[in-house]
Amino acid sequence: MTSSGAVDPVALTCALVDIDSTTGGEGEAGRWLSTYLRGLGYSVAEQPVDGTRFNVLATLDTPDIVFSTHYDTVPPYFRSRVAQGRIFGRGSCDAKGILAAQVAAVERLRAEGQRHVGLLFVVGEERGSEGAQVANATPNRCRYLIDGEPTNLRLGVATRGVLRLRLRATGKAAHSALPELGESAIDKLLDALIELRQKTFPGDPVLGRTHYTVGLIKGGVAPNVVSPAAEAEVLFRTVSDSRKVLDVVAGLAQRVTIEPLLDVPIVRLSTVPGFETAVLQFTTDIPFLTNWGRPLLYGPGSIHVAHTADESVAIDELHAAIDGNVRLAHALLAQAS
C-alpha cells in the first residue's frame, strides 16, 4: 500500500472485521491497525486505555481536521464475507467499514498534498466511551472532528443523549404461604415501573420526544419466597438536559431507590452545505471528545443493520463515503484558511 490514495476499502474492512475486537478485547485489532498505519507512513501514537487496549492516533503534519471512529464492536463476533455488493460481518457497518473509508479519504487527501489531516481510532465506544475519554485528555490543536457512525451518508444535525438508571427495591423475605409476614420487593418495583409508564417526558422541536426502554429486570429468591430485593435498569434516549428527566422520575423514590449509571448529553452538530442532513436517534463518542474541535458526524451504512445478525455495509456506499469525506475536508480546510 502506498500514499497514492489507493487504499482498497473493501480489503481493509474485511481485514479489520476478521479480527475479533468485541469491547474489552480490542488489543489484537489495535496492534494490527498501528502496524498497518505505520506501513503507510503515518506517525502513530498509541494512547493506553487499560493494560491491553489503546486508541490509535495517526498523523502526518499537525492536523486541523481529525477523522475519528471506534474499532470495538458488540458481540457476538462473526467473520467477513462479501456477497450481493455488500460486506457482511461484525463491525462491517459499525464501524470498521467507516474506519476504512476514513483511511482511504485521508490517503487521497495526502496524494493531493494535504498533510494537515489525521486519524483517531478509539476503543470502548460500545460500552461507556472509555477510549474517547482518554483521547480527550490528549493535548492537540485540531479544529474539526469528523466522527464516523452509520448515518446513510448524511451529516448529523443533532444526536440524542442517554440516561441510564438503576431502580432498586428492597423488601422482606417470608414464606409464600404467609405473605403477610414479608414485603415484596418485586411488587414495589412493578408498581414503580407502572407509575413510570404514566409519566410525561420532555420533548424537543428537532429531536422529538424522550423515550425509554426497560432493558433489564432481576429479583427474587425462589417462587415460594416473598422477594427481598429486585431491580431494573432503564435507559432513556434524552432530548434535553438529563436533569429534566430526573425531575420527572423523582416521585418513584417513594417506592425504589434511583441510581444514575450513565449520562451522555445531547449534541448539536456542525454541517456543511451540499450534504443531506438528518437528526439521529443514537449516541456517539462526540460528547466525550469536546477538546477535538467542532464536531461533525458522517458515515456510510445504516443503523438499522448495525448490531444485528446480518450486519453489513454496501460497497458502493464505502466508495461514496470516501468521496464525501474528501469533500468535507476540502470545505473545512477552506473555512480554516
Image: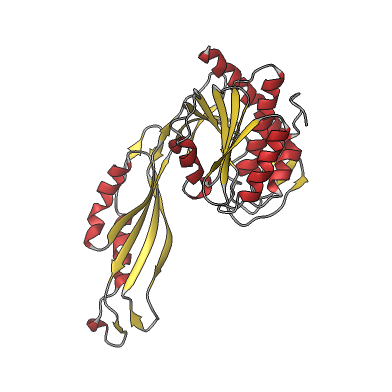
Would residue 211 be found to the left or right of residue 143 on screen? Answer: left
Q: Residue at x 72, y 31 (%)?
A: 40
Q: Residue at x 60, y 28 (%)?
A: 118
168, above or below 197, in the image: below
Instruction: Judge by depth and name the residue closer to the eye, 76 or 313.
Output: 76
Q: Residue furthest bottom?
A: 177
* Residue 283 visible in rendering: no
Residue 324 vs residue 102, the one in the foreground: 102
Q: List x then y, in percent, for residue 34.
A: 66, 39
- Image colouring: secondary structure
Numbered label tally:
0
**Residue 288 appears at what percent x and percent y?**
44, 38
Residue 194: image location, x then y, percent? 32, 61
Q: Quadrant of the N terminus?
A: top right
Left or right: residue 85 compared with residue 322: right
Q: Position of residue 333 (x, y in %)?
A: 56, 16
Q: Is residue 297 above or below residue 17?
A: above
Above or below, comparing residue 32 to residue 7 in the picture: below
From this viewpoint, is residue 212 visible? yes
Front-most of 60 and 290?
60
Taking 52 as reference, is 268 left or right? left
**Along the viewing direction, whichever of 247 and 195 lies nearer the viewer:** 247
